[in-house]
Image (cartoon, helix red, strand yellow):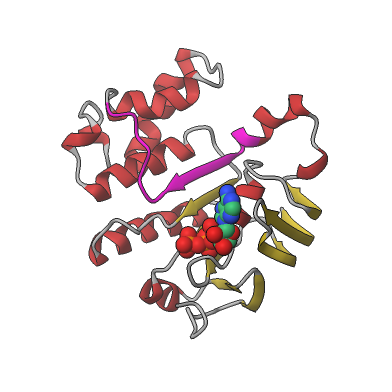
Amino acid sequence: MIEFNSVSKRYAGNVIALSDINFFIDKGEFVFLVGPSGAGKSTILKLILKEEEPSSGEILVNGYNVTRMKPKDIPYYRRKLGVVFQDYKLLPDKTIYDNVAFAMIVTGTPWSLIRKQVPMVLSLVGLSDKAYRYPRELSGGEQQRAAIARALVNNPTILIADEPTGNLDPDTAWGIMELINEINRRGTTVLVATHAKEIVTNMKKRVISLNMGNIVRDQTRGVYGDVAK
Ligand SMILES: Nc1ncnc2c1ncn2[C@@H]1O[C@H](COP(=O)(O)OP(=O)(O)OP(=O)(O)O)[C@@H](O)[C@H]1O
């Protein structure tokens, strides 16, 4: 499902963000990506999303060779990846319903399907009663739920989250991670980059630990660990 083979990434200015990374994530797995600031977590997510290109190595995702993909395949490829960020990235002048619907409009989905799918995902994240509110009228946790609904509305096979609980208090953070866990139980592969030490240690999922662009640990029922400060 997600495979990195000898992947290195060097940014301009000779910054080596990843050096010769190898890992394989199977369909249906839940994986935490941890490590100190600058370890290379976001770089891995950006390479999967094809926002950055590797300097060397091969990346395979959902049956695509990401590095050698034809430009015409990129929109279809990205459609199967749901993405959630620390700062939600909701459109402030659209209601929650329209924020979620917009993700389907841009992919050319007919309104008949949008009208079915949007209430379904809003119900899944517990926001049915806030559908016609604007993002500023929601708490941080609710805004993140809306962002998760938007990420899910096109039925992605993989959910990618970059520090999804970074702006939330501990209780709300737990609620968001439980929601992501529920999404994983329903079959979506999940990859979460995070600094949320307590959550990672308690959830006992697979943990890939990075340090200075190297994988220093890969545990199936892992903990946050000492290197991942
Ligand atoms: N566009 C860029 N140009 C140059 N260097 C970059 C760029 N993006 C990231 N880097 C560098 O690459 C390294 C890895 O960064 P990355 O964002 O992947 O780390 P991270 O583990 O996600 O950190 P954080 O936990 O702070 O988000 C860092 O040294 C960073 O400064």
Q: Nearer the viewer, residue 114 or 90?
A: 90
- Reply above or below: 101 against 139: above
Q: Is residue 78 left or right of residue 124?
A: right
Q: What residue is drawn where x is 29% and y is 56%?
A: 167
Q: Is residue 159 left or right of residue 73?
A: left
Q: Residue 59: give x, y in percent of width and height.
A: 76, 52
Which corner quadrant holds the C terminus?
Answer: bottom left
Q: Residue 128: give x, y in percent of width and height.
A: 26, 35
Q: Residue 116: give x, y in percent of width and height.
A: 42, 24
Q: What residue is drawn where x is 47% and y is 78%?
A: 224
Ligand 1 sits in quadrant: bottom right
- Decide if residue 151 is in sight here: yes
Q: Nearer the viewer, residue 30 or 185?
A: 30
- Residue furthest to the bottom in view is 226
Q: What residue is drawn where x is 40% and y is 20%?
A: 115
Q: Residue 75: give x, y in percent of width and height.
A: 65, 28
Which quarter of the figure has residue 81? top right
